[in-house]
Amino acid sequence: MASGLPELAVELATVLAYAVLSGVLTYVGVLSEQTALETFAGGPAPLAVWFLLLGGVAIYGGVVLVGRELLATKLLSLLH
């Protein structure tokens, strides 16, 4: 039983790292989208489009790539 403890700690640390990365990417994406909306209201349009695209990529990376593909599969593998 004691030999399985370090492996479990590594797996839990990996899950925690994926969760933090997913949260940070999603948060940065939302901030970028908000900045894009503010820039559309009173700034240069190309910069607003850049923020919009950057936010979309960050949200996609946080929710789909890290959240669903890495975090969810790792959690499911730990539960089974």
Image: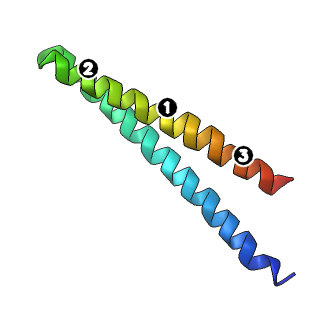
CA gap, disc 2 to disc 3? 33 Å
Secondary structure, mark 1, is: helix
Viewport quadrant of the N terminus:
bottom right
Q: Is residue 3 left or right of residue 33?
A: right
Q: Residues within 10 Å of mark 2 (few under 14, many from 20)?
A: some
The picture quadrant where one finds residue 10 is: bottom right
Q: Earlier in the sequence, mark 3 or mark 1?
A: 1
Q: Is residue 28 left or right of residue 78?
A: left
Say which amino acid is labelled 3: Thr
Q: For the point 77% across and 78% down, which residue is it?
A: 5
Q: Is residue 66 left or right of residue 41?
A: right
* Residue at mark 3: 73
Residue 64 position within the rendered picture, expressed as x and y whole percent measured from the top left: 57, 34
Q: For the point 82% across and 53% down, which residue is it?
A: 79
Q: For the point 12% across and 19% down, which residue is it?
A: 44
Residue 47 position within the rendered picture, expressed as x and y whole percent measured from the top left: 18, 24
Secondary structure, mark 2, is: helix
Say which amino acid is labelled 1: Tyr
Question: Would you place residue 67 above or below residue 8 in this image?
Answer: above
Label drawn at residue 49: 2
CB-based contact (under 8 Å), mark 3 and mark 1: no
Secondary structure, mark 3, is: helix
Q: Is residue 50 left or right of residue 19?
A: left
